[in-house]
Amino acid sequence: MFKLYGFAVSNYYNMVKLALLEKGLPFEEVTFYPAQTPESLAISPRGKVPVLGVDAGYINETAIILEYLEQAQKGTPLLPSDPFERAQVLAIAKEIELYIELPGRACYGEAFFGVTLPEAIKEKTRTELLLGFAALGRHGKFAPYVAGDSLSIADLYFLYSVPLACAVGQKLFGIDLLAEMPQAKALLERLEQNPHVQKIAGDKDAAMPAFLAMIAAKK
């Protein structure tokens, strides 16, 4: 059985968790917070999450874990078999990560935890988010899923990156980043009805107090 190392508040952890659930693959969750201790670094080379424990050892980095699950395991496919269509899904996922998730993450401290950030960082995030969402509007199909008519890896990145970035846009800049993308809003509503997504959301809510206590203890 797989072991999924991480914590239920992490959006990247939840991407892998949803993939495992959608594929019907059995796994055990192991609470694991990012750290630079020797014990943590023996599992994750950079001390980050998620990590997937398999018989042969550990696999780190979300994109690589998802690729491993797709190539090595059975279950519902999350990538098309056609090479071109597969490339499109992976490109959209990477665009969401680079141009939406990462810029938004730069401002999570102020948006969610009350940390005051320099104006230059916030302005950079604002500019990059506008460009990133414009790219998503051009590349995404939303028919009804991000890359076409079936759930794919692009939807995992979309579901666990876009709402956080939208919260940053609304809280810090007063911008509705999906204002011109009603199909994207409809997809979020659709995904929220998925039983596996609902389970993950419930697990996140249950884990949030411990996570916030950990953050407070580090301040």
Image (tube, rainbow, N blue to C red):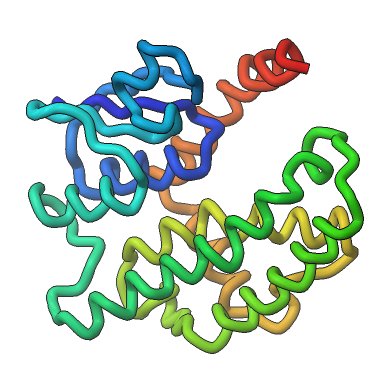
Residue 79's quadrant in the figure? bottom left
Q: Is residue 212 left or right of residue 156?
A: right
Q: Is residue 162 left or right of residue 166?
A: left
Residue 121's quadrant in the figure? bottom right
Residue 5 location in percent, x, y? 35, 26
Residue 69 location in percent, x, y? 18, 48
Residue 42 location in percent, x, y? 30, 19
- Name the residue located 26 percent from the left edge and 33 percent from the top edge: 52
Is 199 drawn above or below residue 206 in the view shown?
below
- Name the residue located 64 percent from the left edge and 56 percent from the top edge: 163
Can you say which quadrant of the picture contains the C terminus? top right
Can you say which quadrant of the picture contains the N terminus? top left
- Name the residue located 73 percent from the left edge and 44 percent from the top edge: 108
- Name the residue located 46 percent from the left edge and 37 percent from the top edge: 200
Q: Please identify the residue farthest to the bottom as the structure is shown.
A: 138
Q: Nearer the viewer, residue 60 or 212?
A: 60
Number of numbered tags placed on the structure image: 0
Q: Is residue 83 left or right of residue 156?
A: left
Is 78 drawn above or below residue 44 in the view shown?
below
Residue 41's quadrant in the figure? top left
Q: Is residue 205 left or right of residue 58?
A: right
Q: Nearer the viewer, residue 181 or 62?
A: 62
Residue 167 location in percent, x, y? 75, 54
Q: Nearer the viewer, residue 123 or 73?
A: 123
Is 52 drawn above or below residue 171 in the view shown?
above
